[in-house]
Image (cartoon, rainbow, N blue to C red):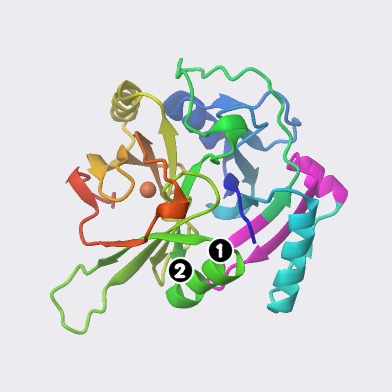
Amino acid sequence: MDVRSLGYVVIESTEPKKWLEYGRDILGLMPATTMPDDGNVYLRMDERPFRFAIVKGERDRLRCCGWELRDQGDFDAALTQFAEAGVAVTVADDSTAKARRVKGLASLQDPSGNGIEVYWGAELDYARFVSPLGIRGFETGFNGDMGFGHAVLPASRLAETHTFYKELMGFGDSDYMHFKFSPDPDDKGQGLHFMHVNNPRHHSLALYEDQENSLGCVHLMVEVHEVDEVGYCLDRVEAAGIPVVSSLGRHTNDHMLSFYMATPTGFAMEFGTGGLKMEWDNFTPTVTSLPSLWGHKFAMPE
Ligand SMILES: [Fe+2]
């Protein structure tokens, strides 16, 4: 499978309006102009009609990640591969695909239960992106082909889930880290796989070994072009009283200069700049023992 990018996320929220305010007033995302007025919240960051869909629901959680395929041939081949692997897939009807602004759409779950959508034929609306906060742009590549950023998802079955993305969905390994938070010799710690798809972003997905995560997400990341925009956002976050989950720092593996904040759903949002752009043909996956060169002091809100 040749997954091209992480195109969008769908977030289930008991109060989508909170995401409208947070996305617009803190992140600087643009409320979508070409999406239907259906009670859901759609947020844009580039020429894609939306990157964040926040749908009204019973729970607050990340519902799924949307992974982009190149064309109908790749989409049909993916459906065959999922079927051969015994993975249950629901192919969406035309109206559901249309609601996502794509030609073809299917949904499934990874072995840890994270929601996945695969799609092809994404529309560009070319409606001018105007950040309500004057952000010049977000780093998403040409026509958005680097995807909106990255997602770190909980994986209760880490090894199986890693194999699923690697062997079945064709993701590549970028880096691996292992965390151990206690001195207990019986504590095996937690693994964290960083994975890339077929674009230069260092990782579009990371899988974190986590048995208990009802939110369906550890964090999402969006990237801006300029370091000052990270600083301005940090000021907005502090002024709004939003918990800073991690202080400013620079990551070792993707060189992202970023901080992390709480979102209305409870998982974190990483807001950064300067992430590496890789050429995968010459890349060898690494194992990293330290998450950050400096900074990134984590303090989870109670
Ligand atoms: Fe991240």
What residue type is disc 2 on?
Ala
What residue type is disc 1 on?
Asn
Q: x, y (%) of residue 268?
A: 39, 47
Extreme-front residue of the structure: 282
Q: Quadrant of the N terminus?
A: bottom right
Left or right? Give the position of 118 relative to 296.
right
Extreme-bottom residue of the structure: 186
Residue 297, can we see it? no
Q: Which mark is residue 114?
A: 1
Q: x, y (%) of residue 216?
A: 50, 59
Residue 208, can we see it? yes
Which SS class for mark 1? loop
How packed mark 1 is, by other alpha carbons closer than 10 Å (few <14, some 14-19, many 20 or more), is: some
The residue at label 1 has a CB less than 8 Å from ligand 1:
no
Tell me the magenta residue range: 94-117
Residue 74 falls within the magenta-colored stretch: no
How packed mark 2 is, by other alpha carbons closer than 10 Å (few <14, some 14-19, many 20 or more), is: many
Hey, which quadrant is residue 26 in on the image?
A: top left
Q: Residue at x 47, y 53 (%)?
A: 281
Q: x, y (%) of residue 206?
A: 43, 58
Q: Nearer the viewer, residue 238 or 160?
A: 160
User: On the image, numbered disc 2 is attached to which residue?
Assistant: 155
Q: Residue at x 22, y 69 (%)?
A: 180
Q: Is residue 132 above or below residue 49?
A: above
Q: x, y (%) of residue 25?
A: 46, 24
Cβ–Cβ under 8 Å for marks 2 and 1: yes
The disc, 2 or 1, on the residue closer to the chain's N-terminal end is: 1
Mark 2–mark 1 Cα distance, whole angstroms, equals 8 Å
Q: Nearer the viewer, residue 79 or 258?
A: 79
Q: Is residue 50 above or below residue 188?
A: above
